[in-house]
Image: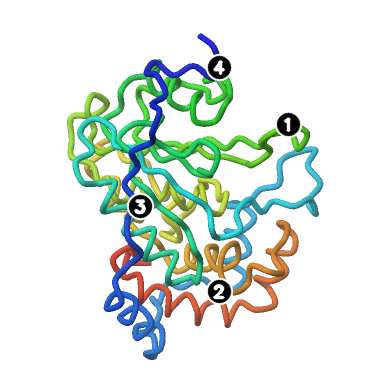
Amino acid sequence: MDARSEPEPRPVSRPVTLLAVGTLVAALLTVSALLRPPPPLPQTTPTLAEALEIFDKAFPIPDGVDPTSAFRLWSGDEEICLIRGPGAGDLPERFAGHLYDLSRTFGLSLSPQVAERAVNCDHHETAIYVFLGANPGDMRIRQIMSYTLDTPGDQHGGDLGMALGFTQIYRPQQTIANPRPRIFVYSASDGTPIIDAPIQPQSIFLEEMLHALTLIADFETEEMRSITGIVSRPDDYTDWYETNARGYCVLDFVWLDLTLGKARPVTTDVQAMRRTLVRTYPDLLRRAAHHRQALSHLADPRC
């Protein structure tokens, strides 16, 4: 199969649903939440030493990569296309609303859009493609990923037909005609046909979007510190969120601040991000408390 092939023909027009930026009332409520004194952070809030230990696990520097090389992908005004897959229902609209809330709270200009098919996304402007729905199987999901990223569909290992969520990044060479980095995200709407148990689509979506927006990695941890931190791997999937975060933790808001928020101008590489964490950790925690309050519907109160 050609790497750029898409089983369905590209339409002449692209009927994309543009979602209106949040209402004035919602914006005022968000501003009000940021101005109010934040509630106390959880008693389990990590110390700086603990945060640094987690940072080194969550933002590893691959072998052979210059630690001072630029890692930033996004400027904060990217277009995100949420593709409605089978069984997605109104999840694309709901999750686009979450992205607007996140964008507004961090002072960004992200542009979420909803499309009925991958070919309906603006292929020249979209930075992050999010396919929402029941897993359509390994071959089909690779076809969609190959089309959206302009790459062969075999870059991601394993059987994607058994995934509830994953994030694939593509960094093109700067010499090609369209050098923009792009990311493909899959986020399941239900467990069919992978597991015969209820899942939490919002939790999967939030985790994959944190991967996409900050480039954070999954990591093992002994305590609930991040939605990408794995405390345990229970045999019964229905017990997963008893020990693992179902929403953003305090440190997740710190990572978002470092990569997309107020700290962003000085965190141009991983080392600079770490230095900023050391130098401004109390300020980062104070802002994280405000962000956690404004985005309480995306947060896990346990962490």
Q: Position of residue 301 (x, y in %)?
A: 31, 69
Residue identifier under label 1: 176
**What is the quadrant of residue 295 in the picture?**
bottom left
Q: Nearer the viewer, residue 137 or 157?
A: 137
Label 4 amino acid?
Answer: Ala
Nearest to the eye among marks 4 and 3: give it: 4
Q: Position of residue 226 (x, y in %)?
A: 45, 58
Residue at 28% in and 32% down: 85
Q: CA separation, marks 2 and 4?
A: 47 Å
Bin the neighbour count of mark 2 within 10 Å (Cα to Cα): few under 14, some 14-19, many 20 and up. few
Horizontal arrangement in the rendering, residue 127 relative to residue 264 (left or right) = left
Residue identifier under label 4: 3
**What is the quadrant of residue 265 in the picture?**
bottom right
Label 2 amino acid?
Answer: Thr
Bin the neighbour count of mark 4 within 10 Å (Cα to Cα): few under 14, some 14-19, many 20 and up. some
**Tag of residue 244:** 3
Q: CA separation, marks 4 and 3?
A: 37 Å
**Tag of residue 109:** none
Residue identifier under label 2: 47
Q: Looking at the image, is mark 1 or mark 2 earlier in the sequence?
A: 2
Q: Position of residue 126 (x, y in %)?
A: 50, 43
